[in-house]
Amino acid sequence: MKILVVQQKMIGDVLISSIICNNLKVAYPNAQIDYLVYQSTTPVLEGNTNIDNIILFQEKHRNSKNEFLKLALQVRANKYDIIIDAYSKIESWLIVLLSGAKRKISYKKKGRTFLYTDNVSPELFPKTNFGLAIESRLSLLKPLDLKIEIDPLPKLFVTEKENQEAKSLFEEHQLKKERKTVMISLLGSEKAKTYPLEYMAKVVDTIADSFDVNILFNYMPKQTSDAKFVFDSCKTTTQEKIYFDLLGNDLRSFIAIMNQCDMIVGNDGGAINMAKALNKPSFVIFSPWIQKESWSIFEDDYINKAVHLKDFSPELFTTENSRKKLKKNYLKYYKLLKPDLFKEKLAHFLTSHIPL
């Protein structure tokens, strides 16, 4: 049997959707499980033996109709028995249409049901603390009626060499071994997903004021100016605990560095999802326009905590105040989510994981 899973989105989505591949391989150990993803997201799949082949959706496939057709025909030539489309947008619709697969599974969408043999109605509210992002992916397995215990946890695989390189980096930067190390998810994937920088500095100060810890910033080189703004906005006593220049060279090195940290605090996004896949405790600050119930995965108020403006001002989130309006005015609503609102929650989280 040959099965293709499609997820042409960003790192967090690809990592979370990999649970489909993981469970398929358990249910069908002799099947070929392939995964179609963006080239930039493949580092989160390295070492995952549940995936036999990674098929790359590259920039050329988006920019050239001929290249896209070549990719679709490549998929068709592979003669998949089953395609599970976790992406469900026009690019994947065309691939599914041309695939020739006997069974095609995706989310039920108006005007697209003819493309699939199995159309799964999406849930509107989570039934567990997995979160809708996890539950919706797992719902795509229901038509197959797998006779296994479903594992909802995304997984990352770090080699011993990568771990040793990260440990060497910690030694090179002279991190204090007796301290716990806190990674700060400093910046979101876009401004509308980034907690105001002056507020983030106060969050970092709260951590440093309360605990003797090592603090690392997660940012890309092109974000250095924003990261420096946060650093400069922190107290001098906080700055002494921040190892500003300790960065990985690429996504794999970040994963290895995160694996050596004890927890993560900050903006929702790929860094948070990777930390959770490494079983690291997380404290997440959600953007006002993001649905917390979808992306606050495995929230249990202990290992994984999350805060959202809706927790403190639910009256702002009416049917009239749509996600589109919230995103358009994201800064206005972000400003209402002052650090003092969740200072006690953050302190409780930190106290649970850092010895006093």
Image: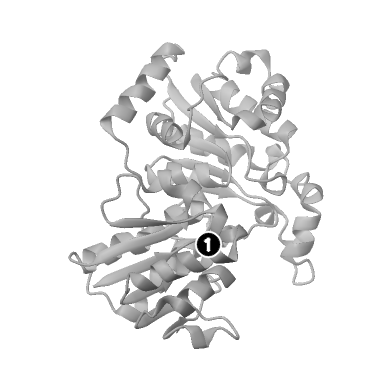
Position in image of residue 299 (x %, y %): 47, 53
Rendered image quadrant of residue 73:
bottom left
Position in image of residue 8 (x %, y %): 51, 60
Where 213 sits versus 202, above or below?
A: above
Of residues 13 and 350, which is closer to you in this image?
Answer: 13
Of residues 156 and 134, which is closer to you in this image?
Answer: 156
The residue sitting at 38% across, 33% down in the picture is 259
Residue at the spot of label 1: 67
The amino acid sitting under disc 1 is Glu
Where 12 sits versus 244, above or below?
A: below
Mark 1 is surrounded, within 10 Å at the Cα level, by few (under 14), some (14 to 19) or many (20 or more) other residues, namely some
Position in image of residue 121 (x %, y %): 50, 81
Instruction: Name, please, the residue furthest toward the left.
Output: 30
Give SS at disc 1: helix
Quadrant of the image for the N terminus? bottom left
Quadrant of the image for the C terminus? top left
Rendered image quadrant of residue 186:
top right
Where 180 sits versus 33, above or below?
A: above
